[in-house]
Image: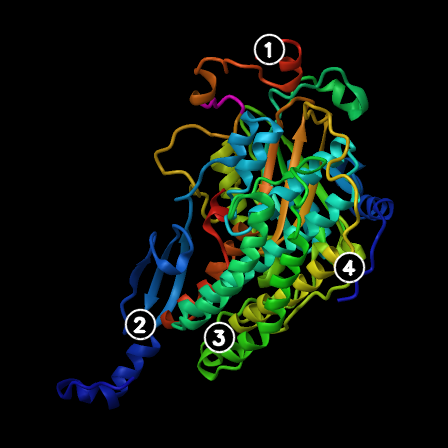
Amino acid sequence: MAIKDPELQHLQDSSAFADEVSEGRLVTEQMLLNVGPQHPATHGVFRLLATIDGERIVRAEPVVGYMHRGYEKLVEQRDYRQITNLISRMDWLSGINNELPLALALEKLMEIEVPPRAQYLRVALAEMNRILNHLMFFQSFAAELGAITPTFYAFREREDIQYAMESVTGGRMHFGFFRPGGLKEDVPKGFIAMALASIRKVIERLPDYEDLLTGNEIFKQRTINIGLLEKEVAYAYGVSGPIGRGSDIDMDVRRDEPYLVYDEFDFDVCTAPHGDCFDRFWVLLHEIIESAKIVEQALEALPPGPILGKVPRVVEAPKGEVYIRTENPLGELGFYLVSDGGKRPYRIKIRTPSFSNVSALPHVLRDTLVADMIAILGSFFFVLGDVDR
Amino acid sequence: MVRDRLTAEDALERVTGALGERVVEARLNHGQVDLVVEADHLVEVVTILRDDIALRCRFFTFLSAIDRSTYNFDDGGGAGEDKKEKKVGTIEVLVHLYSPEKVFHVNIHVLLDFEKPVCPSITGVFVGAEWHEREAAEMFGIGFPGHPNLVKLYLSEDFEGHPLLKSFKLPARSFVKDWPGAKDPDEAAAGGR
């Protein structure tokens, strides 16, 4: 420690000073830094209480609940078909993926068979939504690090995919398109060509993204070896999705326990070994290619046929309970559905990926620099609506 | 990572073998292992599930609770004979673990005393349970002795009641008048509006 004040200069050399330091009597004062609840880097209303010692974060405590809407209580009061529209608002960047586990859980309990066409379309729409979500986080992470250009790149690609999905569902964020047993409607004429064109554009332009960010020295300096999340810790927190795979957790529900028709497609699960901000981002970026591959395969092999299975007019799940999980863009989304035989669920425990991922933040932020905080927050790719439910 | 997939039956056998006496009841439910354990054994059970080399349930999926006080146990059906006996449900803590290597799920049900629900904290085994237990505590009023910081997670400090208990009514839904039209398609077909 260098002392600038000339009057105190003698302390620098005196042995008395060394004692004070070693005995811990001479300490810097800790300061409480409040981030949020409104901060552009937090994707919603998220508050972080950081205790800092100089430049170093000693303790970070996320404060959540500003967006708590009590979905687990609300779903108990609504019948199954109403719930679809409610839960698509949890993670507002991937609405159609949110609707999936409920549909799957009901199909399992009610033993409904879903026609192949509906399954293929579900896969295609879910993966298109995943690309939308990943492009959004691709640009937001870059924007948080001070690079605005990726925003325009990502939104240019997003718009085409968004338009294709809008032509099917009529919505841009909250689609409300998956029904127990299948889909609400069939896709319109020309959708397949439109969707394939938009997906191929993404594949074509992805090398530009790589050049723009992952090859960028400033970007690397700010992300490599920053915000380390060790594999075992990630397991204990239940961290999944791109963040988990960035910590070398080789886990993907689509491959490990294939639902829908994922087992018919050829795709890779991206992992990266270091668990830093760069690896998390790298996984996110490369998952776009894998998703695009799946969409291509699904749409090219789309079978003809009906899009809704045999569903009774009143959706009543028989008694029982089931845990269904799907690979949401941000991680494992699970529904533990308890039914006592009524039109409404008795209880649904919603396990959202962002909740578990964000709960690991205190561990990751400990002993990092204040200047890295935003990079770490940005690399955790969370949506507050998904944390708070 | 090498995935050495277990069938559901093998998983059940291995889990019950490793846990022995600590399990009150074990069965398969939709391909996942369903266990009922006593609260006193919970910490021990999750430790074994995590550390046993043949199980490796290292992924902490979630911890939550279910209030079964208004659960309709009647007209039995396929749900199982055992459930018929305990006519009035109680409150239970539900822990879900997953084994990434062996690819199987374990649901651990811990039945608690409804009047005074207390369940030992498993934050010592899975540090990630911290937020999940805080949520279960505020939503169901369950105590988790051993938790480092059992304050409210979502709700404000002065919030009264435990919203996810069945006794907690949503006023907007219980006091408003009935929906004027037919409530479901069957009713409509029978001559409703």
Tell me residue B79's x, y (percent): 78, 25
Are the two marked residues, 2 and 1, in contact with CB atoms closer than 8 angstroms? no
Tell me residue B163's x, y (percent): 47, 30
At mark 3, the secondary structure is helix
Residue for point 69% across, 58% down: A295
Q: Is residue B126 above or below residue A344?
A: below
Which mark identifies residue B192?
Answer: 1
Mark 4 vs mark 2, CA separation in Å: 52 Å
Q: Which residue is mark 2?
A: A54
Q: Which residue is mark 3?
A: A223
Magenta segment, principal secondary structure?
loop
Q: Which residue is mark 4?
A: A265
- Amino acid type of the residue tagged 4 in the rendering: Phe
Q: Is residue B162 visible?
A: yes
At mark 2, the secondary structure is loop
Magenta-tinted stretch: B166-170
* Of residues A173 and A137, the one drawn nearer to the viewer in this rendering: A173
